[in-house]
């Protein structure tokens, strides 16, 4: 007799597909937030599976800070075509030009905070009532308490102390006009789960994740890519190193790691041996102990 | 860990309930730490905080405090989810606070768990909170309970203390509906019997907590007998290639479905046969809970979200009158004769509260037939009438087709969690 049980990755996959189908059933204008990072790539791959043989019943939206790696942008445009999805780009530069936000100054200036305004404006303009994201609960401690279906008020704010209880697999997406939801289908996945899944599903990823030569500089122990958006301090020197990226965010806040991992298998071996979290190379989280919680309350994803 | 073994792992979801003092956070910290699931930067962060607060050593409990208010007040407000893996299994912990005002969080955490860890402070034995946690675990039909008798280091690793608590617990648990209870003497602080066997309690021959978590049999926790397929979404591609394709997307809630099966669609009662079970990778020979698939039928019948596909000879109950055990989750108490929206599988409609039969005193497990007021964190038995028939099983038989939530129509908040009797 065979055993009727799924492996943990297939169970997670099934859970995520269930959540994506709930989104399509419960919302009128959902959108999938797409960053070009592995997590949102996995979510869009799961969406393709969940609705097959029909196309994905929602658009992809990228909040473009203007400080992205060019490799991520190229991949984004290619992948959207590959999965037959329509791509919407919301631009932080536009928000700056319109005077909606003011650019930070100084060496550590980042557009990370600014993208919240751009995102909320785009949600309002497009009348999206649900934004699907690739956040995982294992990433950061404020995220450990996030729901699959996370309610946002008419200002796009998250109220962590007044979240709706989420029981069994019943998701309550009811809301008033002007409010919206953030939905996180891969909440229960870990970094390792994502990589193993990328491997077994043969999902193509941006080249940034794999080892390459790059001109970099070291600031406060973080290896940054040399780029037009960051001014070097007088004492900082650039050098060529063999690196890769564990996450794909803005060039101004995403650090590289020294690595010769050229395949997904190599990366898995590296992740298994890693002694720091992937967000450990993200400067945006280090600003304060509650940095992520504060940004999330205001509407960050 | 090799990819091959990683792909063979099972998933175990468990819940831990406990208060600030019984060492729950320390236990979780210990499991994460000893299974090497904590990263260097996380450890450094809590080392810094421990030092700033002037605490001795590293406070592993800090690993699980998520929100700012919780760190400031040293309490856990909400359910937090933690993840770790060993070469055998991947674990999802629903970490919930234990005070009486957080019953709703405990219920939430328990709703998806296969196993509950109940912590008892060896110095205090079975207390009211122990009984409350155990009652909730049994109410939510968690198949396995592991009672960890903690702080054994503070009772001189005494076998007598362990045995006496075990016997106290066993006698009160006989009133509960629990299929599997195990006892382990531990010290979360020192690590005894959590991951590594204790050298201080050689009288204990049982397994460590982690060994138990890795090996407990969970494959039969899912109902593979009564075939239930709530239709979640209708897939119609309208493309040239799949012009007439009409598939019913959903997650199998029980039993096994195969192409050729004679099925009935509820509530309409139309019969058909399964034509195919489709996935992106191709069609399957069978599907079982909890797989997400897309089913097509031989006949063209009108089916939409909220309907249920079942086997012809094994049907759930269909009714508009339903009895539930309910945990109330909102500040605003349950209103007798009040109307609420509800969600049950993929079906959503309205209902009216016809009767409150009794409220449970969850500390003594007695029924208070005179008390009909169900406020926040209260549990009681009620009868509802729904505007449309629902297709259900008892919660005991199937946790998916037997569960229901009530929603306040004015605020849209989830106000009640119901288990169909």
Image: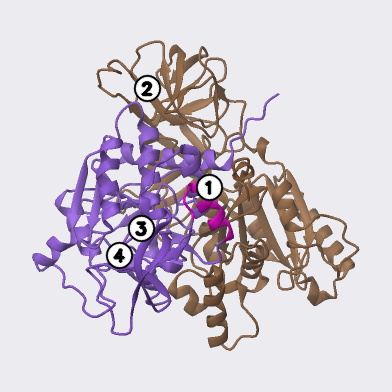
Chain colours: A purple, B brown
Residue bounds of the magenta highlight = A261-273
Alpha carbons under labels 2 and 4: distance apart? 44 Å
Residue A278 seen in this snapshot: yes
* Percent position of residue A153, x then y: 27, 59
Question: Does dot 2 land on a helix, a strand or a loop?
Answer: strand
Q: In the rendered structure, which disc, 3 or 1, sits on the residue that comes first in sequence?
A: 3
Residue B320 sits above or below residue B412 on the image: above
Q: Quadrant of the C terminus of chain A?
A: bottom left
Label 3 packing within 10 angstroms: few (<14), some (14-19), many (20+): many
Numbered disc in front, either 3 or 1: 1
Residue A171 sits above or below residue A271 on the image: above
B104 sits left or right of B202 in the view: left
**Residue under numbered circle 4:** A251
Q: Main secondary structure of the magenta part?
A: helix
**Residue under numbered circle 1:** A265
**Residue under numbered circle 2:** B247
Question: Does dot 4 land on a helix, a strand or a loop?
Answer: loop
Task: State the residue at coordinates (79%, 71%).
Answer: B152
Numbered disc in front, either 2 or 3: 3
Q: Are marks 2 and 4 in contact (CB under 8 Å)?
A: no
Along the viewing direction, whichever of B88 and B378 lies nearer the viewer: B88
Alpha carbons under labels 3 and 1: distance apart? 19 Å
- Circles 3 and 1 on the same chain: yes
Chain where mark 3 sits: A
């Amino acid at each position: 007799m065979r055993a009727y049980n799924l492996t943990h990755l297939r169970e997670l996959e099934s859970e995520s597909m269930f959540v994506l189908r709930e989104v399509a059933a419960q919302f009128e204008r959902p959108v999938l937030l797409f960053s070009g990072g592995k997590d949102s790539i996995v979510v869009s791959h799961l969406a393709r599976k969940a609705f097959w043989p029909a196309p994905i019943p929602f658009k992809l939206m990228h909040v473009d800070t203007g400080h992205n790696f060019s490799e991520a942008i190229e991949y984004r445009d290619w992948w959207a075509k590959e999965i037959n999805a329509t791509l919407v780009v919301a631009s932080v530069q536009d928000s700056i030009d319109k005077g909606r936000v003011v650019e930070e100054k100084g060496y550590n200036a980042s557009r990370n905070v600014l993208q919240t305004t751009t995102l909320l404006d785009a949600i309002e303009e497009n009348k999206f009532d649900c934004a699907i994201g690739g956040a995982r609960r294992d990433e950061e401690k404020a995220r450990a308490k996030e729901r699959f279906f996370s309610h946002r008020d008419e200002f796009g704010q998250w109220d962590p102390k007044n979240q709706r209880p989420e029981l069994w697999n019943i998701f309550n997406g009811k809301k008033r006009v002007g409010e919206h939801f953030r939905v996180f289908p891969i909440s229960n996945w870990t970094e390792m789960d994502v990589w193993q899944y990328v491997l077994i599903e043969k999902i193509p990823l941006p080249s940034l994740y794999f080892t390459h030569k790059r001109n970099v500089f070291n600031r406060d122990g973080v290896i940054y890519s040399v780029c037009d958006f960051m001014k070097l301090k007088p004492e900082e020197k650039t050098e060529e190193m063999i690196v890769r990226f564990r996450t794909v965010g803005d060039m101004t806040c995403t650090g590289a790691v020294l690595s010769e991992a050229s395949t997904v298998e190599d990366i898995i071996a590296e992740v298994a041996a890693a002694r720091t979290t992937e967000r450990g190379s993200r400067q945006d989280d280090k600003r304060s102990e509650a940095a992520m919680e504060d940004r999330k309350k205001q509407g960050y994803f | 860990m090799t990819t091959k073994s990683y792909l063979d792992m099972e998933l175990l979801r468990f819940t831990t309930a406990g208060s600030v003092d019984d060492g729950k956070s320390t236990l979780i910290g210990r499991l994460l730490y000893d299974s090497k699931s904590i990263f260097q930067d996380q450890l450094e962060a809590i080392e810094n905080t421990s030092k700033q607060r002037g605490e001795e050593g590293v406070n592993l409990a800090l690993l699980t405090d998520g929100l700012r208010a919780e760190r400031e007040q040293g309490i856990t407000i909400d359910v937090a989810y933690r993840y770790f893996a060993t070469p055998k299994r991947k674990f999802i912990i629903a970490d919930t606070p234990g005070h009486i005002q957080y019953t709703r969080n405990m219920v939430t955490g328990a709703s998806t768990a296969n196993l509950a860890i109940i912590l008892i402070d060896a110095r205090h034995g079975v207390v009211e909170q122990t009984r409350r946690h155990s009652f909730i675990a049994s109410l939510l039909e968690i198949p396995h309970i592991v009672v960890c008798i903690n702080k054994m280091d503070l009772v001189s690793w005494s076998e007598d203390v362990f045995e006496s608590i075990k016997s106290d617990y066993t006698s009160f648990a006989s009133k509960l509906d629990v299929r599997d209870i195990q006892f382990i003497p531990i010290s979360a602080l020192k690590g005894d019997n959590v991951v590594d066997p204790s050298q201080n309690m050689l009288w204990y021959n049982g397994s460590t907590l982690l060994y138990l978590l890795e090996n407990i049999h969970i494959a039969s926790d899912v109902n593979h007998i009564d075939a239930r397929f709530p239709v979640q979404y209708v897939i119609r591609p309208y493309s040239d290639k799949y012009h007439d394709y009409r598939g019913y997307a959903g997650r199998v809630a029980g039993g096994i479905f195969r192409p050729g099966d004679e099925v009935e669609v509820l509530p309409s009662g139309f019969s058909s046969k399964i034509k195919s079970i489709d996935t992106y990778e191709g069609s399957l020979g069978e599907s079982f809970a909890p797989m997400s698939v897309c089913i097509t039928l031989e006949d063209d019948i009108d089916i939409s979200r909220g309907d249920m596909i079942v086997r012809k000879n094994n049907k759930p109950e269909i009714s508009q009158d339903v009895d539930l055990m309910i945990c109330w989750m909102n500040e605003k108490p349950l209103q007798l004769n009040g109307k609420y929206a509800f969600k049950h599988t993929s079906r959503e409609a309205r209902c009216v509260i016809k009767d409150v039969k009794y409220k449970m005193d969850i500390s003594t497990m007695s029924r208070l037939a005179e008390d009909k007021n169900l406020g926040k964190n209260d549990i009681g038995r009620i009868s509802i009438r729904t505007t449309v028939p629902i297709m259900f099983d008892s919660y005991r038989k199937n946790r998916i087709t037997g569960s229901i939530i009530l929603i306040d129509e004015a605020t849209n908040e989830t106000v009640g969690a119901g288990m169909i009797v």
